[in-house]
Image: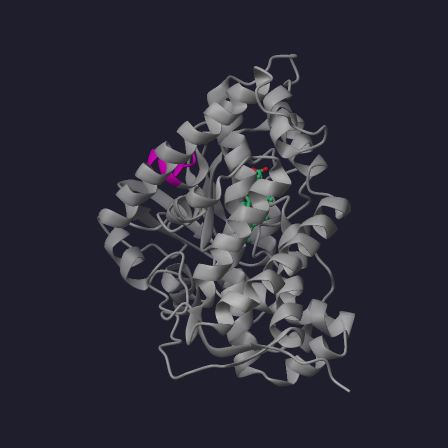
Amino acid sequence: AGQIPNEKTIDDTIDLMKEGYLYIKNRTDDYHANLFETRLLGQKAVCISGEEAVKMFYDPEKFKRNGAVPKRVQKTLFGENAIQTLDGKEHLHRKALFLSLMGPDAQQHLAQMVRAAWEARIPKWEQKDRIVLFDEAKLLLCRCACKWAGVPLPEEEAEKRAQEFIDMVYAFGAVGPRHWKGRTARNSAEDWIRSVIEDVRAGKIEAKDGSPLKEMAFYEDAQGRRFNAQMAAVELINVIRPVTAIATFITFAALALFEHPRARDWVQNGDKQHIDWFTREVRRFYPFGPFLGAKVRKSFTWNGYPFDEGLLVLLDMYGTNRDPAIWGDPDVFRPERFRDWDGSLYNFIPQGGADPAKGHRCPGEGITQEIIEASLDFLVNAIDYDVPAQDLSVPLNKMPTLPESGFILQHVKKKTPAG
Ligand code: HEM
């Protein structure tokens, strides 16, 4: 050791909170290094960034997830002992279940459901002066996610449940009230979904074969053991919550559309290639997941630095998506950059890296991409609206973040068919 940059700090947690998404990138930039050592939450940690770091981080011989996710994150964002904390065979078996629920059919089905649900909101919006897009998106996505999953959601509960899923996500980097809101939200949602699982098993609720509800309720692990109701609830929430959280990317997509109006032509003309690039650029450019954590499984050396067994390692997602060694002018929003992208599984990592079937990369990227595209189509082709003066700044010291205003649309009107 000794050759690599070291923060020489008693604890850097305060700086992490202050700098947020930029914490790791500020230091790898300053040190001109793709790793540095620090102390966070009372323990030694090594932060890594860039494509080579991603390749290493996703090598299951080198890293494990068990013991890497702090309890405070399990009690809010992920749920305790969920898929995010598993390793090896147990992980692969459970991951296959998640992936089987999120293939092309589910992606198309959800995207069409979302598109229709947006359309159905227009009459309500026409009676209002303004709406907040993020608030509308979370409610609409929560309804669609539950419908797709097979979970009955009484209309009068939709607002509350949508907010619970959002509170779990926005508890991630929080201390104090925002963290506690996340815990309360998780407890409430788990109680609800556990009772739904119990009702399905008791035959009181019908669940269709292949629906996330049915598959989670009756999943058997590699040893043929069924989930207890609590674990089934945690994993069912692990598909409904992230669909609701796509509200964040939809809000960023609307912001991008506002700031780069030439993209409206691509959406108007149904130019699939450019729409795909635009949506990817939204996911690369705007901050959502900041970093990922894992622990060293077996000691090894990388770039001259000893990664000792048990060491906590943080992979910089935000910084890798803006790494100048990968992306030219990384701080410029430029969808066409994806024309030259090599399609690597290790350099575009808004939802993790490597092969989702073999590691922890998000199984929901297809769903995410399709739902954003369906929402863009709605914003451009179904309605006209004004964007009034508002605070569109995106604070980088809040993880996750959002444009401050939530993106306000004013004077929304159904588009009259051209010609
Ligand atoms: C994992 C991001 C949408 C389900 C992840 C990971 C990230 C991520 C960063 C962790 C990767 C890793 O640990 O290596 C996002 C973002 C989304 C999104 C930013 C946009 C809102 C979705 C959707 C679903 C989903 C729509 C499901 C319908 C999951 C699951 C995991 C996961 C189950 C755990 C996978 C594992 O541990 O093997 N996601 N995701 N996500 N995501 Fe997503």
In the picture, which quadrant includes the C terminus?
A: bottom right
Q: Residue furthest top?
A: 224
Say which of 174 and 123 sits in front: 123
Q: Is residue 75 magenta?
A: yes
Q: State whether residue 324 appears in this view.
A: yes
Is 387 left, or right, of 336 in this rendering?
left
Is 179 left, or right, of 64 in this rendering?
left
In this rendering, is residue 81 above or below 249? above
Q: State whether residue 284 appears in this view.
A: no
In this rendering, is residue 21 above or below 97? below
Say which of 56 and 332 sits in front: 332
Question: Looking at the image, which residue is at 47% across and 24% down?
Answer: 195
The image quadrant that residue 122 belongs to is bottom right
Percent position of residue 413, x then y: 56, 78
Q: Quadrant of ligand 1?
A: top right
Say which of 34 and 140 sits in front: 140
Looking at the rendering, the stretch of residues picked out in magenta corresponds to: 68-76
Percent position of residue 399, x then y: 38, 56
- Provide the major secondary structure of the magenta segment: helix
In this rendering, is residue 342 above or below 48? below
Q: Is residue 345 magenta?
A: no
Question: Looking at the image, which residue is at 48% across and 55% down?
Answer: 138
The image quadrant that residue 128 belongs to is bottom left
Percent position of residue 326, x then y: 62, 67
Question: Looking at the image, which residue is at 50% across and 74% down?
Answer: 255
The image quadrant that residue 404 belongs to is bottom left
